[in-house]
Image: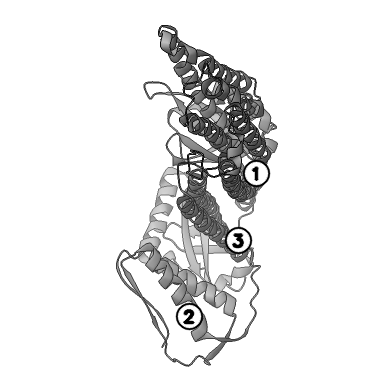
């Protein structure tokens, strides 16, 4: 059963206050249960019944703890520890109820007070609270010594104490000071790590929100049997909210079945696309928006879907415009043929008229009187034209043939020839120049392929960047959580923070690479040529990757070959871009080499 409803007054699932409140609540419940059991046991044992007041005080403290936590008042729950001296009074100071009144009583008092200081170290968010409790503890010890008529012992080192210092006041002061110093260091460490983590998350979140295409992140929900029971919208970006006219507060955390009918309506089967059998890529039209989108789904991890919505409305409109233009040109060319031929049954040209500027240099004397077998057609084409002539004369239908004609200039023109019956022995051939049409169709196909490839590459790019960023982010979040866990030592926490820093640097490298790619695509890279020492640049790259290989314990040997060992050797280039290119090449070589040797350099 999920107990988060008990902590609804504490903000943030990963909130440090909320996590401490959970631990404190469960410890208080466990302690209260033990207090009740002890009270019952002592009630039936006359010799131990005198301990009941002290146990009751502890139980009341735990009850107050729970009440304050349920009200969301965490600080008041922590400060309940100030009542602890009352329990100390009943258990160790008053003669009638005390557990012991010998020299072990002082140690018992110190143990309970040290527990209170440790409690505040773990759960408090203020050094002042610890300091006040230490002061209260010192008053309790002084009061105990007064009751025991032993107040003078605070000026000696003969008292039985936990740390064997011999002076309870000095020992309390020592423990309180030590805990305060530890707390200050621990709190500064937590604040520093939280600040860095918050900065990184803010930057990534802002980058995600500013992506120009709509992005939607969905989380699949499953029932006790592992079957899909629904999907929750985890996140959207600004482009998605603006395109589909929704607000982040309206959609984030909502069931997809409650939101999608409003966003997509009946434009497409969104349950099939996202829920039942998620599709990787789909082209849809959102009718009520009158817009076309390419929906690309990626699955970075089980039960998580990242969907991108690329608006291709302008591309669709341009394609439709080109199609309409193509139809108009085709109609125009069909109504205004370029070439007319009158051909006899045996294939002899008897008339010729051309309005094609390319063919104006070919006169009638070059065509009339010749047969189709003398016009330079290939044998198969010549026999096809001859066969079509006979077929048209016999069946009185229209035949269409496409062929190419090479002009004296060396240029080849493509024609569409339509043959129709003119009389019993003659046909009319209407030739249309379709060279431009054929080239246009090829260009249209190439443009469509280029557009589709660009969309595919963009979707693949988003998927790869999402995957590459997720790896260091997971490490940053995971080891940040470990670094604030009190179960680990300071050294271990330091190691965790080093890992966080390393992964932060990896994340920064990814972002830098993305910026480099963007600069390459937009052509905004400027080359600054100057003389640079090539050997010095190559050696820096070599030592950088050599150290990385040693740290990663890879079974790879890295070698650098220099054609000239002189450090004064210079080349004229952009040293920054040159070093960056060589660094990427070496980095990729190491990345895709499992074992062996990687050598780079020059001759």
For marks 1 and 2 on the same chain, the one whose residue lies earlier in the sequence: 1
Name the element at disc 2. Answer: helix
* Mark-to-mark CA distance, 1 and 3: 17 Å
> Farthest residue toward the top?
44
Residue 16 % position (x, y): 58, 36
Residue 343 % position (x, y): 49, 59
Q: Which residue is mark 2?
A: 538
Q: Please state, as top left, top right, bottom left or bottom right, where the C terminus lies in the image.
A: bottom left
Q: Is residue 20 above or below residue 33?
A: below
For marks 1 and 3 on the same chain, the one whose residue lies earlier in the sequence: 1
Residue 206 % position (x, y): 66, 47
* Mark-to-mark CA distance, 3 and 2: 24 Å
Q: Which residue is mark 1?
A: 209
Q: Nearer the viewer, residue 456 or 71?
A: 71
Q: Is residue 258 above or below residue 385?
A: above
For the residues carrying marks 3 and 2, which lies nearer the camera in this image? 2
Q: Is residue 345 above or below residue 601?
A: above
On the rendered structure, is 557 left or right of 450? left
Residues marked 1 and 3 touching at CB (< 8 Å) = no
Residue at image x 39%, y 20%? 224
- For label 2, count other residues whose C-alpha is less than 10 Å away and answer few (under 14), some (14-19) or many (20+): many
Q: Which residue is mark 3?
A: 515
Q: Is residue 424 above or below residue 551?
A: above
Residues marked 3 and 2 touching at CB (< 8 Å) = no
């Amino acid at each position: 059963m999920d107990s988060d409803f008990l902590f609804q007054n504490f903000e943030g699932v990963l909130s440090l206050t909320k996590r401490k409140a959970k631990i404190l609540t469960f410890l208080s419940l466990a302690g209260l249960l033990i207090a009740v059991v002890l009270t019952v046991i002592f009630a039936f044992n006359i010799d131990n019944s005198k301990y009941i007041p002290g146990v009751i005080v502890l139980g009341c403290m735990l009850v107050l703890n729970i009440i304050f936590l349920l009200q969301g008042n965490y600080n008041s729950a922590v400060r309940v520890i100030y009542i602890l001296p009352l329990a100390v009074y009943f258990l160790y100071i008053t003669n009638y109820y005390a557990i012991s009144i010998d020299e072990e009583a002082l140690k018992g008092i110190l143990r309970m007070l040290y527990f209170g200081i440790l409690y505040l170290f773990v759960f408090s968010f203020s050094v002042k609270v610890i300091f006040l409790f230490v002061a209260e503890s010192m008053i309790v010890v002084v009061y105990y010594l007064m009751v025991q008529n032993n107040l003078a012992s605070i000026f000696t080192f003969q008292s039985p104490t936990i740390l064997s210092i011999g002076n309870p006041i000095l020992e309390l002061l020592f423990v309180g000071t030590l805990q305060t110093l530890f707390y200050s260091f621990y709190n500064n460490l937590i604040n520093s790590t939280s600040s860095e983590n918050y900065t990184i998350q803010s930057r990534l979140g802002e980058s995600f929100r500013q992506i120009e295409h709509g992005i939607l992140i969905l989380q699949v929900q499953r029932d006790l049997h592992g079957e899909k029971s629904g999907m929750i919208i985890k996140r959207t970006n600004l482009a998605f909210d603006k395109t589909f006219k929704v607000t982040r507060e309206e959609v984030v955390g909502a069931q997809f079945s409650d939101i999608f009918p409003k966003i997509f309506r009946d434009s497409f089967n969104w349950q099939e696309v996202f829920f039942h059998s998620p599709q990787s890529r789909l082209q849809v039209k959102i009718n009520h928006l009158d817009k076309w989108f390419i929906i690309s789904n990626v699955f970075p991890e089980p039960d998580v879907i990242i969907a991108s919505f690329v608006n291709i409305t302008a591309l669709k409109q341009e394609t439709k415009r080109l199609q309409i233009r193509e139809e108009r040109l085709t109609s125009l060319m069909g109504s205004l043929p370029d070439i007319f031929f009158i051909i006899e049954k045996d294939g002899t040209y008897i008339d010729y008229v051309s309005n094609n500027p390319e063919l104006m240099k070919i006169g009638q004397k070059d065509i009339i009187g010749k047969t189709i077998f003398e016009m330079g057609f290939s044998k198969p084409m010549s026999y096809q034209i001859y066969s079509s002539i006979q077929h048209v004369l016999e069946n009185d239908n229209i035949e269409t043939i496409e062929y190419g004609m090479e002009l004296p200039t060396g240029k080849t023109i493509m024609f569409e020839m339509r043959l129709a019956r003119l009389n019993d022995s003659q046909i009319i051939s209407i030739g249309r120049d379709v060279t431009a049409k054929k080239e246009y169709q090829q260009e249209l196909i190439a443009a469509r392929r280029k557009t589709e490839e660009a969309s595919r590459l963009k979707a693949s790019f988003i998927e790869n960047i999402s995957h590459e960023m997720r790896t260091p982010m997971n490490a940053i979040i995971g080891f940040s959580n470990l670094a604030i866990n009190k179960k680990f030592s300071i050294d271990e926490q330091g190691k965790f923070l080093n890992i966080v820093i390393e992964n932060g640097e990896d994340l920064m490298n990814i972002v830098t690479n993305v910026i480099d790619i963007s600069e390459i695509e937009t052509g905004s890279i400027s080359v600054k040529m100057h003389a640079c020492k090539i050997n010095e640049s190559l050696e820096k790259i070599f030592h950088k990757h050599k150290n990385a290989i040693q740290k990663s314990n890879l079974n790879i040997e890295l070698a650098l070959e220099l054609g000239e060992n002189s450090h004064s050797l210079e080349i004229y280039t952009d040293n920054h871009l040159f070093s960056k290119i060589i660094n990427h090449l070496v980095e990729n070589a190491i990345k895709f080499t499992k074992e062996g040797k990687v050598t780079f350099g020059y001759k």
